[in-house]
Image (cartoon, helix red, strand yellow):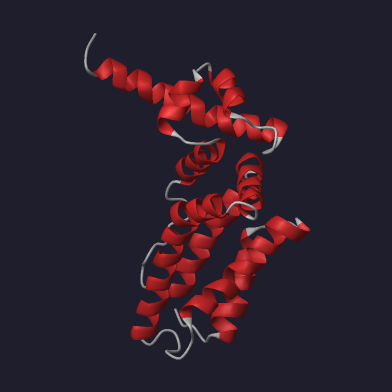
Amino acid sequence: MTDAEPNSRSERARVAILAAAVEECVALGYERTSVEGIARRSRSGKQTIYRRWPSKAAVLLDALVESLGDTADFPDTGDLVADLRNQMHGVVRFFNDARLSAVYRALIAAGQSDAGELRAMLDRLVEPRRAQALELLRRAQQNGKLAADIEASMLLDLLYAPLYYRLLITQEALTDDVADSVVDLVLVRMAGARP
C-alpha cells in the first residue's frame, strides 16, 4: 500500500459523506437527518464521520461550503456594478439549486435556535463573502465610483435582503434579472454607483 492510497480512500470517503449528508437532508428534512443516517447512506462508519465532524450540522455546512466553492466570490474588474451583478448571479444559481438551497434553508432555520450552528455558518459561508463585498464597496468609495458617505454594510444589507426574502419567505422566482434589478435600484439609483 502506498502513501497515496489512504489519502485517496480518505478523500473518497469524505466526498461520499458530504454527498450523503445532502441527500439525507433533502430526503428526510433536517430534523430527521442524523449522523447514523449519513453513515448508512455513505457506507461509512459513524466514527469515521465523528473523527472529522462534531455534528450533522457541521457535515452539512462543509457540503455547502464545498459546493459553493468560488461561485459567489467577488471579482474585482474595476466595474463595481458589473462585479456585483456577476457575484449576485452566482448567489442566484446557488439559491436555485433545489438540493443545496434546501440544506441552506435548513441550516438557517436550525441556527435560529442554536447560536453555535448559526455562528459557524456565518463564519464559514457568509462572512468571508461579506468581507470581500465590503472591500469592493470601500475601494469604489475611495476611487470616487460610489458616494463616500454611504455606509457600506447597510448597502450590502439592502442589496442581498431581496434575494434572501425570496429564498426564505415568498419563494418567488430568483433570476439574474431580479438580481440585476436589485443592483440597478439599490446601487445605481439609490447609491449613485458608476461603472
Task: Say whether residue 131 is left or right of residue 55.
Answer: left
Residue appearing at x 30%, y 22% in the figure = 7
Q: Nearer the viewer, residue 119 or 162?
A: 119
Q: Position of residue 13 (x, y in %)?
A: 43, 22
Figure check: 176 above or below 189: above
Q: Position of residue 64 (x, y in %)?
A: 52, 43
Q: Position of residue 146 (x, y in %)?
A: 44, 85
Task: Write down the quadrant of residue 143 in the picture.
Answer: bottom left
Specify the farthest residue to the top: 1
Specify the farthest residue to the left: 2
Q: Position of residue 124 (x, y in %)?
A: 44, 52
Q: Nearer the viewer, residue 1 or 89?
A: 1
Q: Is residue 120 visible?
A: yes
Task: Say whether residue 126 is left or right of residue 94.
Answer: left
Residue appearing at x 61%, y 47% in the figure = 107
Figure check: 35 above or below 132: above
Q: Which part of the image, by quadrant, shows the N terminus? A: top left
